[in-house]
Amino acid sequence: MSTTELSDLIRNIPDFPEPGIQFKDITTLLNNGVAFKQTIDLLVTRYAERKLDAIVGVESRGFIFSAPLAYALGVGLVPVRKAGKLPAATYQVEYELEYGSNKLEIHRDALQPGARVLLVDDLLATGGTIGAACKLVEQVGGVVEELAFLIELTFLNGRDNLSRYPIYTIVQY
Ligand code: AMP
């Protein structure tokens, strides 16, 4: 299955969750077994030889892709979660959204110092979410090797805020 075919399986929902936002609905890709497997296989092929020490998944749709990737590579999975969800001692970072702000957390002991980390989320929009996750990874001593996403909304120029990091995206709009 080509990346164009993967792209065709992602559904556009206009005005969700609010007017003016075109939501990229990945459930129509996930419920296609060939497409889901192809997506994970693309990531596995790209990262198999990269000697990663950890995969960081960003709550919540990032978990859908980070968990099978970590499993396939035999590499540990570290969750970055919304505030108040992680049970042990955490670091927290607050970042601005289009409306209001959001808080993400990581366990303070989640990574070994110098760990080579790949961060995974479903979609790169403005880059605020993944930028906050990178800060947390660095705070606990990790080294960001790359950021991986299924989808990139190129017109939002998220890459401009993340120029320190290599970025891989499978489907671009
Ligand atoms: P950002 O922080 O602006 O890069 O936004 C990325 C996060 O918001 C990701 O975790 C996405 O799941 C979600 N997101 C932002 N825009 C959209 C969109 N148009 N469709 C689906 N999810 C989105």
Image: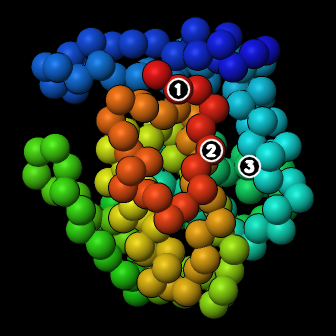
Marks 2 and 3: in contact by CB < 8 Å? no
Q: CA distance from mark 3 to mark 2?
A: 14 Å
Secondary element at tag 2: strand
Task: Give the amino acid type for the residue marked by disc 3 in the picture.
Answer: Leu
Task: Give the amino acid type for the residue marked by disc 2 in the picture.
Answer: Tyr
Marks 3 and 1: in contact by CB < 8 Å? no
Q: Residue at x 43, y 57 (%)?
A: 162
* Residue 81 in view: no
Q: Residues within 10 Å of mark 3 (few under 14, many from 20)?
A: many
Viewer-nearest residue: 30 or 157? 157
- Looking at the image, is mark 1 or mark 3 earlier in the sequence? 3
Q: Give residue 12's position: percent from left, percent from top.
A: 39, 13
Circle 2 residue? 168
Q: Give residue 83's position: percent from left, percent from top.
A: 29, 66
Left or right of 44, for residue 118: left
Marks 1 and 2: in contact by CB < 8 Å? no
Circle 1 residue? 172
Quarter holding residue 155: top left
Q: Residue at x 46, y 22 (%)?
A: 173
**Numbered mark located on residue 67 in the image:** none
- Looking at the image, is mark 3 or mark 2 earlier in the sequence? 3
Q: CA distance from mark 1 to mark 3?
A: 20 Å
Q: Is residue 135 above or below residue 156?
A: below
Circle 3 residue? 69
Q: CA distance from mark 2 to mark 1?
A: 10 Å
Q: Is residue 68 above or below residue 41?
A: below
Task: Give the number of the mark in front: 3 or 2.
Answer: 2
* Residue 74 in view: yes
